[in-house]
Amino acid sequence: MTTPPPGARLAQELALPPDVRVTEAMRRHCPLRDTLDRIGDRWTVIVVVLLRGGPRRFSDLQRATEGISRRMLTRTLRNLERDGLVTRTVHPCVPPRVDYALTDEGHSLTGPLTGLLHWSMRHHDHVRSSRQAYDSSRQEPDGGEQPAQLGGPPRPAPAIVAR
C-alpha cells in the first residue's frame, strides 16, 4: 500500500486540480484561512451585503448595521479596502462626503455571502435548538453544567436594518 504524498488527501477533498499538492508552507500560509479570517469576522458579511446595492455613505452603513460602533465600522471598511473588496471615494465638497462601494472582487463575493446569509436565516432555529439539546445532555449528574466547549454563551447576531 502506497502512502499518498503529504497534502494529497486535503487537495482531493478541496477538489483541487490533480497536479496541485498542499504543502506544509501552504498549510501555514493557507489562502483559505486568510480569506476566511476576513469574511468570517462579525461585521464583514453584513457590510458587504449592504454594499451590494451600490455605494453608501458611512452614516448610512452605520444606521443600517445595528450595534456596530463607529470605530468597528471604520476598521471593517479599512480592512475591506485593504483587501481590494471596497473602494473609498472622497467627494470634494464642504463638508466632505465619503462613499464606499464594492469593487468587482467585492461584488463577486456577494453571491456566496448572500447564500450563506440565507442559509443562516433558514437554519438558525434548528442550530439553536440543537445547541440547547446538546448543552442540556452534557449536564453533570449533580445538576451542574460542564463548562462550555467553545467560547461561552452565544452573542446575539448583529441585525441588518432594511432601508
Image (tube, rainbow, N blue to C red):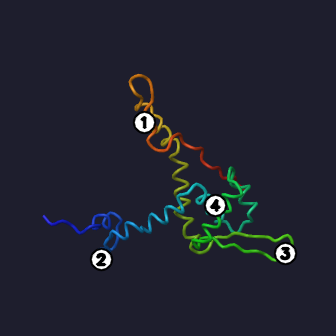
Q: For the residue labelled by badge 3, is the local secondary structure a helix, a strand or a loop?
A: loop
Tell me the number on the disc at residue 47: 4
Residue with the mark numbered 2: 19
The percent coordinates of residue 102 (x first, y second) are 63, 70
**Which one is closest to the eye, mark 3 or mark 4?**
3
Q: Is residue 29 left or right of residue 95?
A: left
Check if mark 2's residue and mark 4's residue have beta carbons within 8 Å: no
Residue with the mark numbered 1: 134
Residue density around tag 3, few if under 14, some if 14–19, many if 20 or more, within 10 Å = few
The percent coordinates of residue 81 (x first, y second) are 62, 71
Quadrant where the N terminus is found in the figure: bottom left
User: Distance of mark 3 from mark 1, alpha carbons?
Assistant: 57 Å
Q: Sequence order check: which comes first, mark 1 or mark 4? A: 4
Residue density around tag 2, few if under 14, some if 14–19, many if 20 or more, within 10 Å = few
| Count of numbered marks | 4
Please report the residue visible at 64 percent of the width from the left and 61 percent of the height from the top.
Answer: 47
Name the amino acid, label 1.
Tyr
